[in-house]
Amino acid sequence: MTTVRGYAAHTPTSPLVPFTFERREPGDDDVEIQILFSGICHSDLHQTRDDWGGALFPMVPGHEIVGRVTRVGSKVTKLKVGDFAGVGCMVDSCRECAACKESLEQYCDQGATWTYNAKERGSEQLTFGGYSETIVTPERFVVSIPASMDLKAVAPLLCAGITTYSPLRHWKVGPGQKVGVIGLGGLGHMGVKFAKAMGAHVVMITTSMSKAADAQRLGADEVLLSTDAAAMAKHANSFDFLLNTVPVSHDLNPYMALLTREASMVLVGVLTDLDPPLKGVAFMFGRKKLSGSAIGGMAETQEMIDFCAKHNIVSDIEMVRIDQVNEAYERLIKNDVKYRFVIDMATLAA
């Protein structure tokens, strides 16, 4: 075992504080990574505060991890010491079910093993995430990061990036399509960048026109104010795809009216009950569809990284020190970030 330093929450109401714990030694198919940068996801805030229930403490958050490979097991083939690598939301799965065999590990029939707030498979050992010095992960759940990329801004791609890239790819977004991205935040800003790079006509759909200039800077061709009934009516039945990144319950009915026949709106943000209720007529007239999507499998995550390298796409970030993590959480509650906090993990040694 290796002693590792990090930051952890010990209760739902306590701040994150310095914490020392043990990592296993790398096995034959494991990769050990020195963590250079760790993104702060809104999920980190929800999990440490037990907003969704089932929190396991002590909890070391972080599932947007970029670092340098320091050790590899004897059976590792795609990475070597010194390479840059990333770890996202998963660190294992059953590897045997139909989903895993299709490289859709996020939908593992037995449940994926999450990077933190979970237990290692077949063990009572808690998984600890990226707010720490190092991580040891099976090679299958590690992606290769080109050295040419801006590593600190790559970190959020491991969650915010793949969460938006996966549905855009699955629903075959491309040239000639009109695509709406609902909500301009950590997820939404990546959705705009990806949809634009895929060749779509991108409309940023927001509740505040104060975000219009930024949306256009990110690549949006148009900005639609969702509270403007007349503007919404002009766009009715015209969208080929809607990516809904809003993280809280909201009225979906007005957005369903924007879809053209047989088109889909996909939810990637809200995990709670949908309220108010959806109206059946919103689906029936036009054979419209509402779906959901969760991150992506490992093959697709590597594909996303390669796509980003090719198209020069990274997240818009603000760097923070590890001792500023609690302040960053408070700012996150107020949406006071454009668009993703990233921790410089070198500050852990300061």
Image: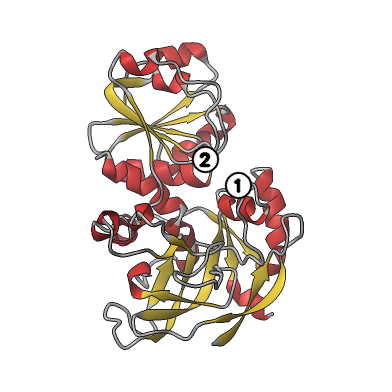
Residue 235 visible here: no
Rendering quarter of residue 273: top right
Tell me the amino acid under the disc marked 2. Leu
- Residue 99 drawn at (x, y percent): 28, 54
Counting the numbered discs, the total is 2
Q: Which corner quadrant holds the C terminus? A: bottom right
Is residue 289 shown left or right of residue 123? left
Rendering quarter of residue 341: bottom right
Residue 195 visible here: yes
- Residue 14 drawn at (x, y percent): 76, 59
Q: CA distance from mark 2 to mark 1?
A: 9 Å
Tell me the amino acid under the disc marked 1. Trp
Q: Which residue is mark 1?
A: 52
- The answer to whether marks 2 and 1 mark residues whose Cβ atoms lie closer than 8 Å is yes
* CA neighbours of label 2 inside 10 A, class few (<14), some (14 to 19), many (20+): few
Q: Which residue is mark 2?
A: 271
Q: Residue at x 38, y 43 (%)?
A: 293
Q: Nearer the viewer, residue 95 or 161?
A: 95
Name the colouring of the figure: secondary structure
Q: Is residue 280 above or below residue 246?
A: above
Q: Is residue 52 above or below residue 202?
A: below
Nearer-N-terminus badge (2/1)? 1
Q: Residue at x 28, y 84 (%)?
A: 75
Label 2: element kind: loop
* CA neighbours of label 1 inside 10 A, class few (<14), some (14 to 19), many (20+): few
Is residue 62 shown left or right of residue 103? right
